[in-house]
Image (cartoon, rainbow, N blue to C red):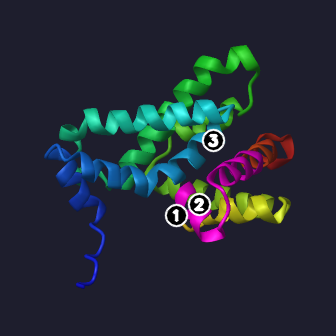
Amino acid sequence: MSPAAPPLSDEALMQRVQADDPNAFEQLYDRYSSRAFGLASMTCSSSERAEEAVQDAFLSVWRSRARYDHAQGSVKNWIFALIRNRSIDIHRRNRRGDGLRVSDAHLGRLATLGSVEDDAIRRDDGHRLRGMLHGLPATQREVITLAYFGGLTHTEIAERLDIPLGTVKGRMRLGLEKARAGIDSPDAA
């Protein structure tokens, strides 16, 4: 039995995606969908809208694969920019119907981030998120930590913790709702 081949880099996967390889696209999706959902959840007012943002953004990855240029930035940053932009669009489209959940100032920051500013805000947001994580029940904190800091998919988390996939998704949703409420509170600014 030969050892498994090391996973392909993002750039190698993207080259295969650009060559119309759906398996490479699936690998890219598996690699980033969980973190993409987390980013979308920070902006969208519901998990359904966050899922819509992720689905739309990855559809855009597939449709615009020929236009991706590695000289303009990494695959990961390109994907997360698509997620961020789609999340903001969905949030703005729906905010009149269910109330504003994320401040306009926060949306403005997300929409205009440059790479240095992006890094600084990510560090600040990460610090605040870690602080909020300590206030969550241990079961919710564990699945969120495995997803966002460990980069695991929902399925991988379920397997690692030996719990049903639905339980992982439920804990994730509840934890993210509590984290989002903390981010949207006036004290979080």
Q: Position of residue 21 (x, y in %)?
A: 19, 47
Q: CA distance from mark 3 to mark 1?
A: 16 Å
Quadrant, the N terminus: bottom left
| Number of dots carrying numbers | 3
Amino acid identity at mark 1? Gly
Q: Which residues are magenta?
A: 152-175
Mark 1 — residue?
151
Q: Residue at x 43, y 31 (%)?
A: 56
Mark 2 — residue?
147
**If you read the primary sequence from the N terminus, does the residue marked by circle 3 or circle 1 appear first?**
3
Circles 2, 1 touching at the beta carbon (< 8 Å): yes
In the picture provided, is 50 more to the left or to the right than 141?
left
Task: Indicate whether 62 appears above or below 74.
Answer: above
Farthest residue, direction front: 1
Q: Secondary structure at mark 1?
A: loop
In front: 3, or 57? 3
Q: Position of residue 142 (x, y in %)?
A: 71, 66
Mark 3 — residue?
41
In the picture provided, is 5 more to the left or to the right than 34?
left
Circles 3, 2 touching at the beta carbon (< 8 Å): no
Q: Residue at x 42, y 39 (%)?
A: 82
Amino acid identity at mark 2? Ala
Q: CA distance from mark 2 to mark 1?
A: 5 Å
In front: 104, or 95? 95
Q: Position of residue 14 (x, y in %)?
A: 24, 52
